[in-house]
Amino acid sequence: MPSRRLKTLVVLALAILTNGAGNLCLSYGMKSVGAPGAWTPPGLWDVIGTGLSSAPVIAGGVLMLIFFALFLSLLSWADLTYVLPMISSCFVVSALLGHLVLGEQISLVRCVGIALVSIGVLLVGRTGPSSDASSSRLSGSPAP
Amino acid sequence: MITALLVAIIVVCFSFGDIALTRGMKQAGEVSSLRLAVLDEVGGRAIRSPLVLLGGALQIVAFVTYLLALSRRDLSYLFPLTATSDIVTTFAARYLLRERVTPTRWAGVVIVSIGIALISAS
């Protein structure tokens, strides 16, 4: 089913980009809010209150909600064991965005991690998005 | 000891939350197109599905527990442990959702999990 495969990849790409942009907004916004003075309920409440009045944090939250809706849509037709590792590309995109936009350093260990996630994602991507589709593809039976 | 308990709660809630969400969404039906009528119909069924609600609640519990654990331990100490939740989820999906996990997919899941652990540990 090539059309379903294409649909899966398009929605995956949208979800990963939304997640990356959301993380970027949240990270940028929360840095200006600052760390909690104390890990106590009033200290945390302060941070939450300030965070919720910051435009980048609100934008980040909205993007994360859109990401969750896209994730649920994927689960409506694709395998969880396919979607979960594929969604891990978020880690790569977030690390790259953090480096390019926020100027965060990427250590050697983190580079190796990014490479491993990329290899794993390519491997999982070779299996079809859903069990029924992948079994018919592997057995080579032509679609009716 | 308490940290180990918190990590166990995080892994179990994330994994079974995902399992519940997947089963709920399969029941709600495929998002077959981006037409508003389809989104409204599937979305409406999803929001009223007990499994989707349970899955969402478990994810929230996992996230709050994660924040609690973070206040006790450094992120780099916790994340290699929570990265194993993908492997637990794959096992659970194989038996509870009867998904076909081919050797290629298993290899991919394990390599991705090691990668996540490295990214988060550094």
Image (cartoon, coloured by chain):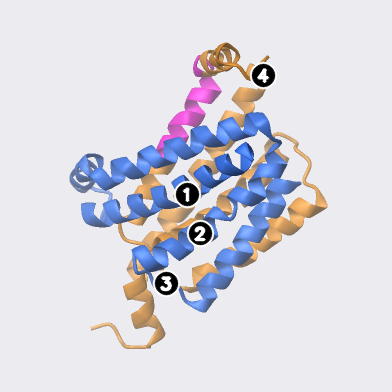
Chain colours: A orange, B blue
Protein chain holding label 3: A
Choose top left, top right, bottom left or bottom right for residue A37.
top right
Protein chain holding label 4: A
Q: Which residue is mark 2?
A: B88
Label 2 CA crowd tier, 10 Å (few <14, some 14–19, many 20+)? some
Q: Residue at x 55, y 38 (%)?
A: A21
Q: Secondary structure at mark 3?
A: loop
Q: Nearer the viewer, mark 1 or mark 3?
A: 1
Are the residues under badges 2 and 1 in a single subunit? Answer: yes
Nearer to us in this view, B19 or A133: B19
Q: Which residue is mark 4?
A: A34
The dot on residue B12 is 1
Q: Which residue is mark 3?
A: A128
Majority secondary structure in the magenta region = helix
Nearer to us in this view, A88 or A10: A88
Cα distance in 3D space between marks 2 and 4: 34 Å
Q: Secondary structure at mark 4?
A: loop
Of labels 2 and 1, earlier in sequence is: 1
Looking at the rendering, the stretch of residues picked out in magenta corresponds to A52-66
Cα distance in 3D space between marks 1 and 3: 27 Å
Q: Are marks 3 and 2 in contact (CB under 8 Å)?
A: no
**Type of amino acid under label 3:** Gly
Q: Nearer the viewer, mark 3 or mark 2?
A: 2
Q: Position of residue B21 (x, y in %)?
A: 34, 49
Q: Secondary structure at mark 2?
A: helix
Q: Nearer the viewer, mark 4 or mark 3?
A: 4
Cα distance in 3D space between marks 2 and 1: 8 Å
